Image: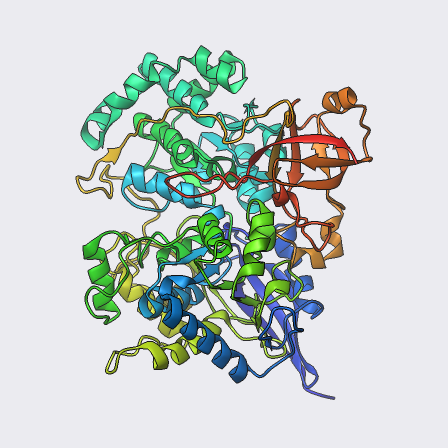
Amino acid sequence: PPAVERRTTRSTCCYCGVGCGVLVHSRHDAAGERITGVEGDPLHPANLGRLCSKGRTLAETARSLHGRALVPELRHRRQDPRPPVDWAVALDSVADRLANIVERHGPDAVAFYLSGQLLTEDYYVFNKLAKGLLRTNNIDTNSRLCMSAAVTGYKLAFGADGPPTCYEDLEHAKTVLFAGSNAAWAHPVLFRRLEEARAKDPDVRWIVVDPRRTDTAAMADLHLQIQPGTDVALFNGMLHHLVWEGLLDQAFIDRHTTGFSELKRLLRDYSPRMAAEICGVPVEDLVTAAEWFGRSAASLSLYCMGLNQSVHGTDKNLALIHLHLATRQLGRPGAGPFSLTGQPNAMGGREVGGMATMLAAHREITDPAHRAEVEALWQLPQGSLPPQPGLAAVELFEAVRAGRIKAIWIACTNPAHSMPDLGPVREALQRAELVIVQEAFANTDTVPYADVLLPAATWGEKEGTVTNSERRISRVRAAVAPPGQARPDWWIAREVALRLEARLAAPGAAPLFAADTPAAIFAEHRALTVGRDLDIGGLDYAVLEQRGPQQWPFRAGAEQGDARRYADGVFATADGRARFHVTPYRPVAEPTSARFPLRLLTGRLRDQWHGMSRTGRVPALYTHSPEPALRMHPEDAARRGLKAGELVRVSSKRGGLVLPLELSDEVGSGTVFAAMHWSGQHLASGGINELSQPAVDTRSRQPELKHAAVRVERA
Ligand code: SF4
């Protein structure tokens, strides 16, 4: 009988920012190799063996090659079919066409649109290719749609990106404030840890701020069902009460912060009564929330897309952080503001600077000293890095549509489904001179626009690292080889980079892409972090192998990373003080009107992930929510003569969608809800983002994906 080898590979789940450790079981024999099962890694500190429904079914997503991109494909004219070609032909063609566009139109005519699901090593190579070789900052990612407002919030308040907290705080918190986070569905394993902590300590209280009565809200001790977008008014009102009741840590404010007196003046306009009126909640509930938060031995805030995906997302983050700063609810076990990352590696992408608005290792593009540091580390001539930030996601696709960007390279993401206001995004992809799509799955909504399709390896087939919500870097390991001709993302980017380097680099220039393994790329990334807030000078693949996943910062010589930050009250600003900011409440970008009288909210389902390229392959994951639907309050449906199950058309100024109607008082009257997952694969159109808002927050440049004014009528 042929020899059968069974292996177990330690890796990390590829879905959400919890970053659970997994043990991947695989079978290898003469007929081939395949992943046979996945279980939780009991030694990973994020999940200690637990997995949610998505993680538990990872093996099923890896079994079938149906829908996988397996060979490079290339066409020279958009109207032609896209036949398979060899890798060498595809890579040469991509390099030639990009070089040609750069020579004709300059480097900013090229753009990259990446993904928080890429590994840190993939991100690193792409970022160096864009900024270091081509010299364009037009490299943004779907993380812009996810965590940008959390980043600007942290930077403005603390002087540096990244949460000050860690997962152990879930077990130490006495008051947990969920804001715009349905953690029960979106971060299930963390939610289990919270449930267990509350079961052990009946004094633990949960407050949930959410316009919907989600599963998280249903389990709360206090649910503040605010009107959509009124979070800033709520947090200002709570802080007003804390000021009034003397529940501040005035000594901490005086010694470790600036800007509180200006904020205090603004707070006069946010009496609890006034704030409660704006939010549409009972004033007693607002006061109770403030009391629980302010008087608690340890208050922890968990927040997510409900705060971030907003034109005022930065202010929402800041107003929440103000509550922590004013009461010194941070820097000790169980206390602090804690943004829950949506994607598995949004943090890692930021660490390497893989976005239009930042440089490597949390450096600023606009800071000449930071540019000079990166130039020195990359051995580039002084002054070669472009000084202006590039275009962020929404502006980037608009520039493609307007013809200012000629070529766009999209990797590991599906903007024809996930960007807001899909009509103009599709136009942009149609008009672009060159669309390169690097994908593991050939059936996404974006692939039909590709002039070049580059087949990528995916989870279970590639090596690298990811950073989860608590700043913990974990290894991702290959259990099997990629199928067909699929290749790791870093390899594809590097192969094109080498070809472009041969053509564009100045004679005698130092080679930029010498690192030719994930470990070597990680080592190069590490060198850029030394001396920075995220210093990982003490970390390499060998340390991760021996000691398992580690948190940053992890400095050279350290035994371990820092679990919490700012415990000493010294922040990452120039003077070491945290900053309060003036955060007035401002309404949503698109108010309701006579034509569009309802508020559309969007969000996740428990068992699906993003555009369902992966989770959509598992029948069991449809049992929880078998089909797309529009959820409406029964009274709103009765007023319109609509019944459960009938097809309705939901429309905004930008587009419409036909969905079955579901009745539920989970949404308040005047509000409807639809999940973000269902895409053109399942519907006649691109999904709920046909309707959503392209308006962005001016500081984070994150769009208001969470809210749009709509109407609903019988289809
Ligand atoms: Fe994967 Fe997130 Fe579920 Fe953990 S909680 S198993 S990381 S999807």
Instruction: Quadrant for residue 122, please give it.
Output: bottom left
Q: Residue 702's x, y, as percent?
A: 45, 43
Q: Residue 540's x, y, as percent?
A: 35, 67
Which residue of the protein is positioned furthest toward the bottom in this rendering?
Answer: 1
> Is 265 above or below relative to 71?
above
- Image side of residue 707 versus residue 713, left or right: left
Tell me which residue sits at (51%, 20%) in the image.
279
> Is 555 above or below relative to 436?
above
Check the picture and name the quadrant holding the C terminus.
top right
Q: Residue 483's x, y, as percent?
A: 62, 76
In this rendering, the count of numbered labels is 0
Front residue of this view, candidates 386 and 248: 386
Tell me which residue sits at (48%, 51%) in the image.
398
Q: Residue 66's x, y, as percent?
A: 72, 68
Front residue of this view, candidates 589 and 458: 589
Front residue of this view, candidates 622 and 454: 454
- Image side of residue 388 versus residue 55, left or right: left
Front residue of this view, candidates 226 and 50: 226
Check the picture and name the quadrant holding the N terminus.
bottom right
Tell me which residue sits at (55%, 66%) in the image.
437
Res. 542 visible in picture: no
Q: How is the image coloured?
A: rainbow
Tell me which residue sits at (22%, 42%) in the image.
573
> Is 514 above or below relative to 2?
above
- Image side of residue 228 versus residue 585, left or right: right
Res. 656 visible in picture: yes
